Each structure stands twice: as C-alpha cells, then as structure tokens.
Image (cartoon, rainbow, N blue to C red):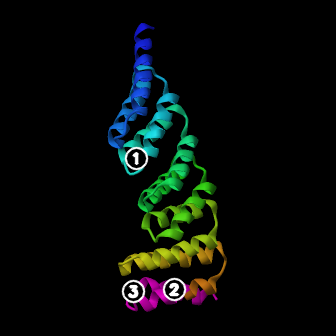
Amino acid sequence: LEERSQWERLLVCMEAYKGAMDDPGRKLDLVVDMSSIAEDRLEDLERSFYLAAEAVQTAPHRTDVIDRLEQIGQRAGLLEQVVAVYAATAEEAESTEDAMSLMRRKAELLKNELADYERAVDEYEKLRELEQDRFVLEALDELYSVLERWEKLAEVLRDEIDLASDIEEKLLYYYRLADSVEENLDDANRSMDVLKEAYLLNTDKMETLLRLRRLFDEK
C-alpha cells in the first residue's frame, strides 16, 4: 500500500509538472510515462487508457503512441472508446494525412476487432471518397461480400479493376465481377458484357473465351 501511495503521489506531481510545460515533445513523453506508471505500477488500466488517449490527441502522427492506445484499450475492454478517440482526434487533426490515418485505424478496428461491419463500411466508404486506396477497396470487397450487398460489391470490383496495373490482375477482377453478377444478381446478360470487356483487354486469353462460350450456350 505504501508503494502504491508513492506512485500515486508521483503521478500527482507529474500532472502538475505537465501543466507547467511548454515543450510539446517533452510533455508527450511525460504523458506516455504517466500512462505506463498507471498501467504497470498501479494496474489501473482505465487511468492508463485515458492518459494514452491524451497522448494520441497530442501526437496523432506517432504510430507507437496509437499502437499503445489500442493495446491498452484491448486489455481494458475499451475498444469502443478507442474508436471514439480516433473519431474526435481525426476531426481536430491539422494534417489531412494524420486525419486519414486515424480514419483507417478506426475502420480497421470496427472491422477486425469489433466486427461491426455496418459501421466499418461507413468508415471505409468515407475513405473511398477521399482516395482510391488498394487496402480500402480490399476491405470494402470483403465487407460487401460478407453483408451480401452485391451491387455495392460490383461497384468496388469496378474500382479494383481500374486501380489494378497488371492485365492478369485486372482479368481476375473481371472474372469475379462476372461471376458475382451472374450468380448473386442473376443477370447473365450483364455478366456477358463484363466478359466482353475482359476479352477486349486481352483477346488471347482462353479462359475469357471459355467463360463467354458457356454463357452463350446457356442462353
């Protein structure tokens, strides 16, 4: 108990010292140290979390600080609060790059840790409006497949075709789009149109011809 009391007094002193500091870098280091003390010495994860959140708001460009917040949030069962910190910090970030990085982290957390696919889709769609990013499209591809939103998946596959630089990669997306349109939207004619586009991309590709042949035979 005496040792704990000493650590508590140290945190009180550090808090007072922090208020008098002008150097942002030194203040950030102090907050990180305070968070570590709360976690390791006092085993107070909630207190450590809110100090880590303060550090993120101070330095949204520091991936190590962000990683630490998520680690503590995971241990403390405060992942929803992590999402809230990311949202608030992204809105206030002076750098567009920092804001988008936090938006990506928020989307990944919703998708991979909280399995909140509806909210994850909303976040990834916001990112999609801001940039054509391969990882954003891959995430939306996966989410729309899980949620069985086939028209939305078709839109994303179109973007993936446009973004792919390699012909073989483009063809794979064309085939996936053709299959999804045929099987999930029950539209063989539209699937055939997709395959015709694929054929024009590479007229020597036998797989495209075989796929077209099958659809013609089934009509």
Image location of residue 140, percent across then percent down = 54, 64
Residue type at tag 2: Leu
Q: Position of residue 19 (x, y in %)?
A: 43, 33
Name the residue rendered at 65%, 81% in the picture.
187
Query: Mark 3: which amino acid?
Result: Lys
Q: Residue furthest top?
A: 2
Mark 2 — residue? 195
Q: Secondary structure at mark 1?
A: loop
Which residue is disc 3 drawn over?
205
Q: Are marks 3 and 1 in contact (CB under 8 Å)?
A: no
Q: Is residue 141 left or right of residue 15?
A: right
Amino acid type, residue under disc 1 in the picture: Ala
- The vertical placement of 47 against 60, above or below, is above
| Cα–Cα span, label 3 and label 1 | 51 Å
Per the model, the C-alpha gap separating discs 1 and 2 is: 49 Å
Residue 136 at x, y = what percent?
48, 64
- Look at the numbered disc 2 and give the secondary structure of its residue: helix
Q: Which residues are magenta?
A: 194-219
* Rendering coords of residue 144 (x, y %): 59, 64
Who is closer to the viewer here, 11 or 199? 11
**Residue 186 figure quarter:** bottom right
Query: What is the quadrant of residue 125 in the picture?
Result: bottom right
Disc assigned to residue 59: 1
Task: Identify the secondary structure beneath mark 3.
Answer: loop
Q: Name the mark nearer the viewer: 1 or 2.
A: 1
